[in-house]
Amino acid sequence: MKALILNSGMGTRMGVLTSEQPKCMTEISVGNTILSRQLSAMLEIGVTDVVITTGYHDEVLRNYAESLGLPLKLTFVKNPEFAETNYIYSIYLARKYLKNDDIILMHGDLVFENGVIDGITAASGSRMAVSSSMPLPKKDFKAVIEDGKIATVSVNVFENAVAAQPLYKLDKKDWAVWLESIERFCEKGKTTVYAEEALNAVSRQCDIEPYDTREMLCAEIDTPEDLKSVAERLHQAENRKVYMSFSSDVIHSGHIAIMKKAARLGKLIIGVLTDEAIAAYKRFPLVPFTERKSLFENLSFVHKVVEQTELSYKTNLQAFKPDYVVHGDDWCNGFQKPVREEVIEVLRTYGGQLVEFPYSQRELFKEIESQTRAELSLPDMRRSRLKKLLGLKGTVTAIEAHSGITGLIAEKTVVYDNGKARQFDAMWLSSLCDSTAKGKPDIELVDMTSRFRTIDDIMEVTTKPIIFDGDTGGLTEHFVYTVRSLERMGVSMIIIEDKTGLKKNSLFGNEVAQTQDDVEHFCDKIKAGKKAQKTHDFMICARIESLILDRGMEDALTRAFAYVGAGADAVMIHSRKKSPDEIFEFVDKFRSRDKTTPIVVVPTSFNTVTEEEFKARGVNVVIYANQLTRAGFPAMQNAAKCILEHHRAKECDDMCMSIKEIITLIPEDN
């Protein structure tokens, strides 16, 4: 693509300002002339081949353009008859440099804000700048649009016309048609008319669509009054506020490109999501907030960097009232769609505008994301994140997973609620659900080797921390090997219950014979496990069965403090009652003496309590222990019954997720 800038006119209406230099050298802002801005704009959109027609003060213009030192190929074509002809003749003289290329064509006195040139060049096909918002000028160009195409460009048309400016992006086929018409006009001696007269003669053969700049700055300067007005509008444009939000750990060239585009719209403000905000909807960030914020602060084109505490933009938009919010077009669907809709609604309240650029699909960026996921799935990275999340959020949630696909559901399920994205922080590998998935009773019949294979299946396709249901932990001599194996695999926490003998599910309580371990023996098991582990990241949680077995609150508390004293990193208190009262009582009494040790709950029976209430009372881990299993098996059974009842599968389809939707959960790099 080449640029053609028409600068052969005399600019007599500018008075003394053009007595010793052409109009394009008029200063429009501090240190910038009309021409220097145009040439810089060409460079920024990737156009390096520029043809400039000259006439009045030809040598002054050449020397000035070359003195700018821009890495452009400049070709000057002088119109020696500049005083007697119009710019149609200047184009004619430059024609040999302009054939077989796409063209950006503009008048040399045209001032436009960056968003205009970015938009018109990004738009598909041939385009001309028009404005549906500006009043029709008396003496300047108007355009008549028919069937979505530019039909007529003239200063004399008013009916069914819109304001237009001499800024074009022309595909070479359309430009060839227009240039041939220019040649015919000039060779017939029609050299005093606008070049648009030649366009009007062939407009039906061209496909030039309007590009609506609306109220953005795109205006010619003909008089000192124009200069003052345009300079003021340019100052306003360059000082508009532009807002972008980032959660990225790694800033790659795609991010840089979109930020540079955003910065061309005004002063760029970057909202950096806090670690907690990212962890709430995505994953625990690899790079902490302070470092990520510093990355953006060191970019020269970024005006300001601020904290964004939620996925929702609302608070920051109301505080800064940016003229533009910039985002890729990848959030039009999926869980971020409500965020986008909220942004549009907030912008509407004060007249802001959402600008969306195409989301880059380059394989390199996909590879970077894949590498990030791979790093997050490494044992050392995964193991440490549960402790980090507890320190960051105070309370984390986990949902059971018993296979690779349920792990992916736990990993990828996100909902947008009240300005925040919500997701599960971790996965719970329940012995009950693992046994059930294998069709075995929950009596520790499924051995550790088999359960480790389940961990492998889940870890292979996910990145979130894993909490492992260790049942009783088995013999102390065996437990130490379990701890070492889980720690080496990257599991974050094991929970072991203070019972002995053949395992019975806790929710049966005293309906079946269950024996609680004595405090001293269980403490010894905890100590042995802590001694066996190699890192500080791995956690051993002691599960207290006193309330399940009706041993009373004092027994539960006595055991809890003893287990913490033996080295337990957390305690889990369980109950089979539907009321949470005894759980709350335990938490209150434990917290009166121990403010820091994490408390874990599994609200299977007392399921009316919200996570917010648990957090307010001092609970740190909430585990949804078997809901995916309990939801999945009835659904599968109903589907099977439906097929049997109808002797076909059609009626079953409404119960089923499409295979395509299921496949989208599965990473392509498996």
Image (cartoon, rainbow, N blue to C red):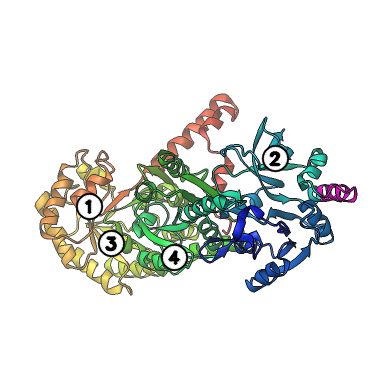
Q: Secondary structure at mark 1?
A: loop
Q: Secondary structure at mark 4?
A: helix
**Range drawn in magenta:** 176-191
Frontmost residue, 57 versus 574: 57
Which labelled disc corresponds to residue 391?
Answer: 3
Compare marks 3 and 1 and give the one earlier in the sequence.
3
Compare marks 2 and 3 and give the one earlier in the sequence.
2
Residue placed under numbered mark 2 in the picture? 155
Compare marks 4 and 2 and give the one earlier in the sequence.
2
How packed mark 4 is, by other alpha carbons closer than 10 Å (few <14, some 14-19, many 20 or more), is many
Q: Secondary structure at mark 3?
A: helix
Say which quadrant the C terminus sits in. bottom right
Would residue 185 be counted in the magenta stretch? yes
| Position of residue 63 in the picture relative to residue 513 (left or right) | right
Identify which amino acid the numbered label 2 is placed on.
Val
Is the stretch drawn in magenta largely helix, strand or loop? Answer: helix
Residue placed under numbered mark 1 in the picture? 619
Frontmost residue, 16 versus 416: 16
Q: Are marks 2 and 3 in contact (CB under 8 Å)?
A: no
Residue 653 showing in the rendered view? yes
When the figure is inspected, residue 314 is found, relative to residue 22, above or below; the finding is: above
Compare marks 1 and 2 and give the one earlier in the sequence.
2
Cα separation, mark 2 vs mark 3, equals 68 Å
How packed mark 3 is, by other alpha carbons closer than 10 Å (few <14, some 14-19, many 20 or more), is few
Identify which amino acid the numbered label 1 is placed on.
Val
- Please provide percent x and percent y for residue 477: 29, 70
